[in-house]
Every structure is written in structure tokens, then in C-alpha cells.
């Protein structure tokens, strides 16, 4: 998973397309973004575009043949897992698992301390649980 800033892009609006968004970051990487994700940050048309942030990863997708039918051939596509309008929202999401670990350690420490254990015993338990 990688975080990036989407600096430009365009909605797919040709006949038969679903209205998804193709965005580009400073490195020129092409990033697929679902239409519903764009709508969640109040962007529905190219005119609505403002730079935004995304957590991205490569996903395997099936290709389509000349008639538009899905084939067994797969390719990797860089796509947005989540999108955010501010850097703070991105940082909060990117560090949410770390924040949970800290909260868990704090909870464990409080629980062990209130159970009557000595500081040395509490520290030993916390070391083992890491």
C-alpha cells in the first residue's frame, strides 16, 4: 500500500464506460479510481476536480477482448483503495493500525496496573505481548 496525491485526471464518459476516474500523481503513475469513490469526495465531473490524496495498491484484474467480453488473462492495475480530500485524513487513515496498537498497549498497561501487579510485572507482561 502506498499513499499519493492525485494531481490530474479524467472521468471515463464515452459510450459504454462506467464513469470511473483515471488519475495521475507527480510521478505520472496512472491510477484507477472507482466512480463511487470520486462521488464520496464530491467529484462527479471533470469540472469538479481538485487535487486529492489516495492510498493505492496493485490489483489483478481480468482483461477484456475486442468484443468487451472478460477473458482469463489478468494484468496488474494500480488503483485507489481509499480517497481523501485532505492530507490529515490520509495520515489518519494510513496510521490507523499503528494508532490502534498504541491504544491497545495503553489499555493493557492500565488493565495490568489496576490488577495489583507491580511495575516490573506490568512491564514484563507488556514486553511479552509485543
Image (spheres, helix red, strand yellow):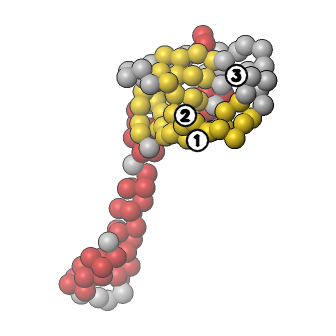
Crowdedness near tag 2: few (<14), some (14–19) or many (≥20) residues, C-alpha within 10 Å: some
Q: Is residue 11 visible?
A: yes
Q: Position of residue 37 (x, y in %)?
A: 62, 32
Residue annotated with mark 1: 60
Camera-nearest residue between 67 and 115: 67
Camera-nearest residue between 119 and 63: 63
Residue shown at 41%/36% (left/top)? Answer: 3
Quadrant (top left/top right/bottom left/bottom right) for the C terminus:
bottom left
Q: Is residue 98 above or below residue 52?
A: below
In the picture provided, is 53 more to the left or to the right than 38? left
User: SS class of the residue under badge 1?
Assistant: strand
Q: Residue 44: give its label.
A: none
Residue shown at 51%/39% (left/top)? Answer: 58
Residue annotated with mark 3: 19
Residue annotated with mark 2: 77
User: SS class of the residue under badge 3?
Assistant: loop
Q: Is residue 105 above or below residue 37?
A: below
Mark 2 or mark 1, earlier in chain: 1
Do the CB atoms of the residues marked 2 and 1 lie less than 8 Å apart?
Answer: yes
Mark 1 or 3, which is nearer the eye? 1
Compute the Cα span from label 1 to label 3: 20 Å
Compute the Cα span from label 3 to label 2: 17 Å
Mark 3 or mark 2, earlier in chain: 3
Q: Which quadrant holds residue 18?
A: top right
Q: Is residue 80 visible?
A: no
Compute the Cα span from label 2 to label 1: 6 Å
Amino acid at each position: 500500500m502506498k499513499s499519493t496525491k492525485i494531481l490530474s485526471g479524467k472521468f471515463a464518459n464515452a459510450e459504454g464506460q462506467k464513469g470511473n476516474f483515471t488519475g495521475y500523481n507527480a510521478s505520472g503513475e496512472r491510477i484507477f479510481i472507482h466512480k463511487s469513490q470520486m462521488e464520496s469526495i464530491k467529484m462527479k465531473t471533470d469540472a469538479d476536480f481538485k487535487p486529492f490524496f489516495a492510498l493505492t495498491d496493485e490489483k489483478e484484474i481480468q482483461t477484456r477482448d475486442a468484443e468487451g467480453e472478460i477473458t482469463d488473462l489478468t494484468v496488474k492495475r494500480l488503483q485507489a483503495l481509499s480517497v481523501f480530500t485532505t492530507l490529515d485524513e490520509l495520515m489518519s487513515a494510513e496510521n490507523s493500525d499503528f494508532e490502534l496498537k498504541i491504544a491497545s498497549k495503553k489499555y493493557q498497561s492500565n488493565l495490568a496496573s489496576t490488577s495489583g501487579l507491580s511495575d516490573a510485572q506490568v512491564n514484563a507482561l507488556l514486553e511479552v505481548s509485543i
